[in-house]
Image (cartoon, rainbow, N blue to C red):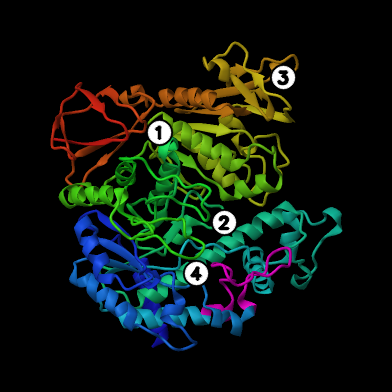
Amino acid sequence: MKQIAILLASLSLALAQPPKIPTVLYGAAYYQEYMPSDRLDKDIELMKQSGLTVVRLGESTWTSWEPKEGQFEFAWMDRILDALHKAGIKVIMGTPTYSIPPWLHAKHPEIMAVHLDGSTSTYGIRQNMDISHPAYRFYCERVIRQIMAHYKDHPSIIGYQVDNETSYYQSAGPVVQKGFVDYLKKKFGSTQELNKVWGLVYWGQLVQGWDELPARDGILNPGYKVEFERFQRTRVTDFLDWQARIVNEYKRPGQFVTQDFSGGVHTDIDQWAIARSLDIASTNPYYSVQDELDFQTATLTDDVARSVKDANFLVTETNAQTIGWDSKGQFPPYDGQLRMNVYGHLADGANMVEYWHWHSLHYGQETYWKGVLSHDLQPNRIFKEFSQVGHELQKIGPKLVNLKKTQDVAILFSADSYHGIRYMPFSDKHDYMSLLQQLHKTLYRLNVGVDIITPETKDLQRYKVIVVPPLYVASDTVLNRLAEYAKNGGHLLLTFKSGFTDEYDTVRPVMAPGPLREAAGFHYQEFSSLKQTLALKGDPFKAGEQNQVSTWIEMIELDTAKALAYYDHPFFSRYPAITRNEFGRGSVTFEGTVLSDELQMRVVDTVLKQAGLDGPDRQLPAAIHVKHGTGNSGHAMHYYFNYSGSPQSFAYPYSGAVDLLTGKPVAKAQSVTLPAWDVIIAEER
């Protein structure tokens, strides 16, 4: 019977469909069990008053579910669920596996994560275990099955969250090492192949049998280290897939399984692989507010969450009031910012926005990570704005949900390249992620929406422009696919170090940039670090004071490409800094150095114009950002945001519309003035 159940769960995952969400879900994580006194009825009264429609429960309190080994308690949660259901509030139930109970640590201390330096995680913090340890898995499965069996028919539950912000928690102990050997056996087949791809002849480290493979701690070989990081990512994928399969044995039709990724694009997990086990992806974006609010980092997090399944997603946690594990950085949002940020997430394709959390904690490490309610648990300024949004969404949520996003531009993200450069860094100031962030921020400043793709993405031609941070580790297949993309009419922006090593982080024994040479239209044999910034000769992109490059130079020799800029330097002036090659029906622009932010924006702007992406969004004031999509009604939607403390005006350039927030018409070419920290949502008619 168990095999049949596993088969059915596997079939359920294979046939998983995005959940049908008829209106935007709006709410918060809720922990009645954390409160200094019983206030369930009062909280629900305030929730109903505010327009809240959904809460997340249960993921943080394993000891409340199982206070002693094998003793399962449900009455406390039954009462909460029944009260929420009576109030018409939906529930996402979490599996409580990311923080183990004291009795489990006492009985099985061997499940704690052992780090590369040999140290072992101590008890007292969450996420301190080896997620692949059989003993840990046994107790996880038992508590999950107990919860699922008890609540599978409860009408309030619309979905389940497996674990919480999962990673591999730096675990590299004996269980992990054994798993790595098994992984290598399956991938490479023999130690002879391993010796070849990693170059273990170097320093006389040839491995004659699998029992000779040294443990990861102390290893300097970059190929080994990159492969170990890949293996660590597969461990997280396997763990969450395993949990999803258990939940799928119990969930009802129409319910969903999700996992909440922490913010940003991750190098310690494979968000795209994990998403294949989920019905819908979730994410937890946190970001600066007050005068630093521009929503760019939140947008990057949202872009990843939308891209991993090419579908709408859920925001399971985000800023309510202040955030921080201490009180040194307490910055509550200005008036209007909480409301604006909700619509920012919806404009990125979110179908739900939940805060962490409903109420502020009176004890514990997250005392100053405040919720909608402050420590006094009374309605406040944030609660008032939260309620304003809740009531707006009651009216217009059905129009905003399931926004369809079609992007013309993508950024290619490579976790392998991040790790390859991390193990062979080119700078103490710049790295892979700083360059990816710069490119995303550049496109955001230009009001260009993006998807985040990976080297495994096959359908590249759907994009007019693909921007590639240093693709240091990549197979010939991936590089040839990018070249074909350009040849078939795409416009490619490549950056330095791309194509240098193969998929095993081994330097190619050919002229750089390897398989990209024909498409890029140049080659190089030398490169140099830079101790000081340089200018580009003649300021070709009109960047003024920011006409600067730094850190690294690839000493390019042109084949068919044309130079767009040269260095202003007595020696390096012979080498192009930026090139462009017309290739097939498309083009390849290449940056052989680190560009200043302003210079990067101007170079990217030329690539966008080359691709015909030069519309009215580029003429907006710097503080105004716009995002687009097709609404649930099938009409075009244009979200305009004023990320500044003063009014901003612009000419509305699209077809006649209605601002859904005010009901007022918006005509083409009409001058629109947005107050400080405000938003309009123009639905075309």
Distance, label 2 to label 1, CA atoms, is 30 Å
Q: Which residue is mark 2?
A: 268
Whether residue 489 is visible, yes or no, is no
Distance, label 3 to label 2, CA atoms, is 38 Å
Q: Residue 633 appears at what percent x and percent y?
A: 16, 45
Distance, label 4 to label 2, CA atoms, is 16 Å
Magenta region: 110-137
Q: Which residue is mark 4?
A: 98
Q: Is residue 240 left or right of residue 154?
A: right
Distance, label 3 to label 1, CA atoms, is 33 Å
Q: Which is closer to the viewer, label 1 or label 4?
A: 4
Q: Are marks 1 and 4 in contact (CB under 8 Å)?
A: no
Q: Which residue is mark 3?
A: 572
Q: For mark 1, does the 10 Å Cα neighbourhood hold few (<14), some (14 to 19), or many (20 or more) residues?
A: many
Residue 392's tag is: none
Q: Which residue is mark 1?
A: 464
Mark with earlier residue (1, 4): 4
Which quadrant of the rendered structure holds the N terminus? bottom left
Q: Residue at x 23, y 73 (%)?
A: 83
